Image (tube, helix red, strand yellow):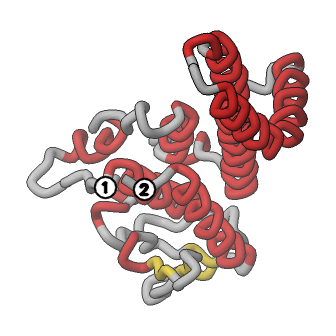
Amino acid sequence: YISESLILDFVLDICSGLKEIHNHNIIHRDLKPENLFVSNELRIKIGDFGISKELESLSDYIQSEQVGTFLYMAPEMILENKYNYKVDIWALGCIVYELCTLNTYSREDTPLIHIINGIKNDGNINLKIYDIKVQNLIDNLLEKNDKNRPNLDAICDYCKALKRRNSKRQFINMLDCYYIISNSYDKNERQLDSNNNLLEDEDKTEEIKHVTQDKKWESTGLIFCIIKLYQKLKEYHVH
């Protein structure tokens, strides 16, 4: 699977590209994985503007003009209703869904009503891997009513907030590990003290104590600081 962090980075890159396109009153109309190009640094660029449409204003609606790739067409376009730039938002939702499931929703030989309900009824992403908020993002992008789909600024804010939340979780997990390590040091030292009477060679005992103390002091300062920070974060319910 693709990591949630990387997916969110991809979404932010695609949104950045769409913002630039939409700022010039252009609808892409064929946003799909085949038209997204990945750099060596894993940055996303949008390409293939062959069927893009320039409008006088981004708020304008286009009268029934069904173009693009069927799999990524928004319901209003499939139904040959008026549509606007929100068709690109729908296509983005399809792409995020595919990134999370590594599957496309097959629309071949499918009744029209099932096509429209399509991806949202095709099952959820794996919540053991991805946060429920990623599912919520997909659901919002794939709103059948285009007026209910979020704009690009809202999508970016949502993804950035989710990335910050994930970073805090990772940091807390790291603190948990250090907390366990610290307790392990204390436990080992107590175990060593209790076993001293079982060692016949007093010099060997002193040598073991010395090594244990050295190893503990190598990390005591760092662990002490982290434990204190951990306790402070716990007070503020960072979880």
Residue 212, x across and y down, in percent: 70, 35
- For label 2, the crowd category at 10 Å Cα-Cα, with few meaning under 14, some 14 to 19 and many 20 or more, is few
Q: Hey, what amino acid is under mark 1?
A: Leu
Q: Which mark is residue 102?
A: 1
State the residue at coordinates (69%, 76%): 25
State the residue at coordinates (39%, 71%): 33
* Marks 1/2: CA–CA distance: 8 Å
Residue 143, x across and y down, in percent: 49, 41
105 to the left or right of 88: left
Task: Specify the quadrant of the image occupied by residue 95.
Answer: bottom left
Quadrant of the snapshot with the C terminus: top right
Q: Which of 54 and 231 is in front in this view?
A: 231
Residue 118, x across and y down, in percent: 29, 43
User: What residue sits right under mark 2 in the picture?
Assistant: 2
Q: What element carries label 2?
A: loop
Q: What element carries label 1?
A: loop
- For label 1, the crowd category at 10 Å Cα-Cα, with few meaning under 14, some 14 to 19 and many 20 or more, is few
- Any part of residue 206 in sight: yes
Asked whether the beta carbons under mark 1 and mark 2 sit within 8 Å of each other, the answer is yes
Mark 1 / mark 2, whichever is N-terminal: 2
Q: In the displayed orientation, state which residue is furthest to the left.
A: 109
Q: Hey, what amino acid is under mark 2?
A: Ile
Task: Specify the quadrant of the image occupied by residue 180.
Answer: top right
Circle 1 or circle 2, nearest the eye: 2
- Any part of residue 76 in sight: no
